[in-house]
Image (cartoon, grey):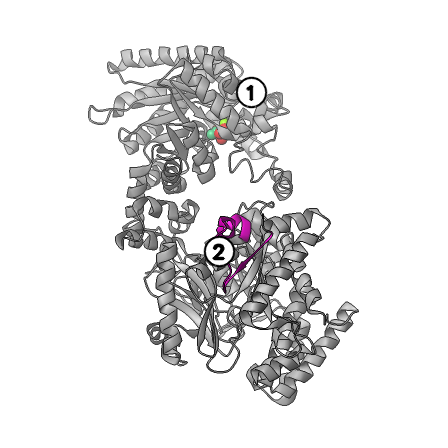
Amino acid sequence: MNTVYTFGGNAPHDDPRQKDKTVTGGKGANLADMASIGLPVPPGFTITTEECTRYLTHGESFSDELRAAVAQALGHVEQTVGKRFGDAADPLLVSVRSGARVSMPGMMDTVLNLGLNDETVQGLASASGDERFAWDSYRRFIQMYGDVVLGLDHGLFEEALEIAKEDRGYFADTELSAGDLKELVGEYKTIVAAERGEPFPQDVNEQLWGAIAAVFDSWDSERAKVYRRLNAISAEWGTAVNVQAMVFGNMGDSSATGVAFTRDPSTGERAYYGEWLINAQGEDVVAGIRTPQYLTKAARENAGAEKPSMEEAMPEAYAQLARVFDLLEDHYKDMQDIEFTVQQGTLWMLQTRSGKRTAKAALKMAVDMVGEGLINEQTAILRVDPMALDQLLHPTLNPDAPREELGTGLPASPGAASGKIVLDADTAELWSNREEDVILVRVETSPEDIHGMHAARGILTARGGMTSHAAVVARGMGRPCVSGASGVSIDLASRRLRIGARELKEGDVITLDGATGQIMAGRVPTIEPELAGDFGVLMEWADKHRRMGVRTNAETPADCKTARGFGAEGIGLCRTEHMFFDASRISAVRAMILAEDETARQSALDRLLPEQRSDFADIFRTMAGLPCTIRLLDPPLHEFLPTRDEEFAELSDSLGLGVDHLKRRANELHEFNPMLGHRGCRLGITFPEIYAMQARAIFEAACEVSTSDEPVVPEVMIPLVATQKELAILRALVDRVAEEVFADTGSRVDYLVGTMIELPRAALMAGEIAEEARFFSFGTNDLTQTALGVSRDDAARFLGAYVDKGIYARDPFVSLDVDGVGQLVELAAERGRATRGDIKLGICGEHGGDPESIAFCEKVGLDYVSASPYRVPIARLAAAQAALRSGG
Ligand code: PEP
Ligand code: MG
C-alpha cells in the first residue's frame, strides 16, 4: 500500500485509495480528483493519514520507506515542472499543507514558498526576472515557517515589517522595494536565530521534513483537540500532508489569488461568490490584512465597492474560473469551496471541497438542486446536517423593535444574539460558564480563540472578510457573526472599546444581527422563526422517507404546541412531576411527601387531583387525539422538600405543624444516593395512593376530552421498573382505577400500560416484563447512568477528560454509548418482542434528539423516538437519514 500518492502532470490517479478521504484526506483526495478530470492543478503529492498515525505512535519519527517514497514523489513534481528542488539557478518551490478527512481548523494550515534559501532566492530572482518578487517570497516563507513550523511568535515578524514600512514612510507592503525586502529578510533571519538559538534552516530537505513533521504534530495540538472534541472527530483519523508545486499569485498585476464558492454560502443563492486579491498570496486573503475585492461585477455593485471585480479586471481568467465552477458542481453534485491562483494570466486550482454553509443555505441548496435535477430527494435529505437545523429553529431580531445602531460590519454568519461584551476567549468561556450571554469582540480571531467562540452567543471582529477565520468558524458553529466592522477599535489594556462614536467597556450589552451586519446597543427583542419554504419542503421529504415516528418530551400545553408546530406526532414522555413544581401546588406536594399517615397523605392528594386532571385535559386537547405517554411520578422525593427556612415556615403555617417537626421529618427522608433511592415505581409500590391519584387524573381527563373523532388513548408509563412483579402490581392498580373512573363517568377510553426500560435488570428481564407491558420506552438517561455507574448529576466534573482522552468518543449522556448501553437496548427490544410481538418500542432519553443515537434506534427497529420540542425537526430529519442509510 502506498504511503505517498502523486497527482498532476502524468501521474496515474487510478488507485482508489488515492481518492479515499480516509487515506489521503479531503484536500489530497480532491486534488487527485480535479487533476484526473483535467483541471489545471499544480503537480504534487500526498502523504497518507496512516503515516501521520504511524509517526505519532512511533516516537515522532519517519520510516525509511516514507523518506524514499517522498524523494520519488518529489522527482515526479520536479520532472513535471521542469525545475529541481534546491536548485540554485531555478529552484522548484513547494507549498506544504495539512488535510484531514474533514476540514479541521486548529491544525497547521499552510507553508508557502518552501525551498527558498540564501542561494535559491537569487535563482528565483534571475529565473523570474523579478527580484522584488523573489525577496518578497523569501520573507513570506521565513515568516510562515518561523511561525507555524518553528513555533516563533509571528508578532515579531509583523513588528519588523511595520517598522520597515514606517522607517521608509510607506503605507502598504507593496511599496517595499527589492532592496527593502532583502534587508527585511536579513532582519527576519536575525529574529529566527535569536529566538531559536540556531540559524534559519538553509537545507531545503530539512525545511521540507520540518514542515511535514509540523503538520503531523499539529494533529495533536491543543487547538486541534478542542475542535475534535466539539465536532466528534476521532483522534485516530490523523491528517494527510499535501506537498505541491508553488504557483504564484504575487507575480505582478496579471497575477492574483482568491477563494470562491460556487453558490452563496450564507443564503444558498445560485450566484458565484468569493473574494480575490491582485498580486497577492493566499494568506493575504484569509488573514484580512488587505481588504479583498469582489469576484463578480454584480456583487461589487451591490456592495457599492470601488475596486474592480475579477469579472471586470481579469475577464479571461474569470471566464475560465466560471467554467471550472460549473464542472466541479456537476462532478461533486454539491456547492464547492475553492482556492485558486492566477499566475501571469493562467488559472490554477489549489483546492476544492464541499463548502461549509449556513443552515439556511444548506436547505436552500438541497431543495434547489433537486429542482435543478442535480440531486434527488434522498440525496437532499442526506445533505443537510440535522444539528444545523438548530440555527433555523431559534429566534431572529424583531424587525419592528426599536434599535440603536452603533455600527455595521459584514454579515458573516446569520442569526441574532445579544450579550455582554467580552474581549478575549478565556473571559468568554469564564462568563459563559456563569450562565451569562456573551459576545466575543476581537480585532480578528485565530484558532486559539475557538473555545471562546464556542462559549459566545455571537462574534464581532474589527477586521477580516467573509472568508476570514471568524466568519468561516462562526458559520460552521452556527454562531451569529459580524466581521470586518472597521468602526470597532479595542483597547485591551483598559478593557474598553469604541464602536462608531460610542465608548463601551467589557460587560456592556450589545446585540448583533449576523444577517445584516448590524451592531446595536443593548438587548434587542427577537421573534420566533417561521418554518416555511425550503424548511417545510425538506421536512416533507424527510417524513416521506422515515420509518420511525417522532414524538416529543413535553409536559406543558405550550411545549406541546411548539412541538406540534415542529411536527411532533405525539408525546413520548410527559414527566408529571414537572407539574408539581408550580407555586400553587408545591405546598400540597410537600404535604403529601411529609405526611406521616395515609389520611394526611390522602387529603394532600385530594388537593392535587383536580390540578393534575386539568393539566392532563389541557395536554390531551392540545395533542388532539395523538398518542400521549404519561409517566407516573418518578423523581427522588427530596427534590420537592423545602430547604430554606422561609419554605419551612410557610409549610408549617399551611399544615399546622411545627417547623422543628417538619425539619425532623425532612431529615428522616434524607437519602445517601437519591438517584438510586426511593424514586420511580418504588414510590408507587410504597405509596400506591400517589399513583392512584395520578391514574385517576389521567383517566378522568381522558374521558372528559376524548371524542369519537379524536379519541384519547393514554399510555400510562411506570418508571424505573426492575422486576416484572413491580409492574404487575402497579398495572393492576392502574387497571383498577381505570375501571373505577369508567364506572363513575359512564364513559370509557382505550389505554395502554407500559414501562420505561432504564435499569440494566429491566433490560435483561425484558422478556418477562413484556408480559405486563404493552410498550417499552427506553429511558436512556437513567440506563446510561446505571449501566456506566456514572451519576448523571456528577458526570460533568470528569466526563470531559474522558472524552478528551478518547475513552468515550462523545459524552455518553448526549450520544448513546452504542457499544455498551446500546447492547442493553438491543437485547431488551429483542426479548420484549419475543414475548409480545406487537410491543411498541420507543426512546425518551435525551438521546432521542441526537442524530447518531437516532441512527442506532433505526438499526434496532424502534417504533419511534421522542425528543424535546426544538429537537423534533432534527429528529425527523435524522430519522429519515437513518432510514435511507440503512437502505429503507
Ligand atoms: C430517562 O431516564 O432516560 C428518562 C427519560 O427519564 P428522566 O430523565 O426523567 O429520568
Ligand atoms: Mg429516568
Relative image position of residue 491 (x, y in whole percent): 60, 71
Q: Is residue 622 left or right of residue 670?
A: left
Which quarter of the rendered picture does the C terminus lie within? top left
Q: Quadrant of residue 305?
A: bottom left
Q: CA gap, disc 2 to disc 1?
A: 66 Å
Q: Is residue 242 magenta?
A: no
- Residue 429 image position (x, y, % from top left): 59, 53
Between residue 429 and residue 251, name the one nearer to us: 251
Q: Secondary structure at mark 2?
A: loop
Q: Residues within 10 Å of mark 1 (few under 14, many from 20)?
A: some
Q: Residues within 10 Å of mark 2 (few under 14, many from 20)?
A: some
Label 1 belongs to which residue?
Answer: 678
Q: Amino acid at mark 2?
A: His
Magenta extent: 3-24
Secondary element at image label 1: loop
Give the amino acid type for the residue marked by disc 1 in the picture: His
Answer above or below: position of 184 versus 745. below
Asked whether residue 10 is in view, the answer is: yes
Dot 2 beta carbon under 8 Å from ligand 1:
no
Q: Is residue 479 above or below residue 78?
A: above
Q: How many marks?
A: 2
- Of 753 and 127, nearer the camera is 127
Occupied quadrant, residue 810: top right
Of residues 157 and 636, which is closer to you in this image? 157
Q: Is residue 636 above or below residue 303?
A: above
Please give the label number shown on residue 412. none
Which circle, 2 or 1, is nearer the viewer?
Answer: 2
Q: Is residue 593 above or below residue 876?
A: above
Indicate left or right for 869 with 283 as reference.
left
> Which label sits on residue 13?
2
In primary-sequence order, the first of circles 2 and 1 is 2
Question: Is residue 23 covered in magenta?
Answer: yes
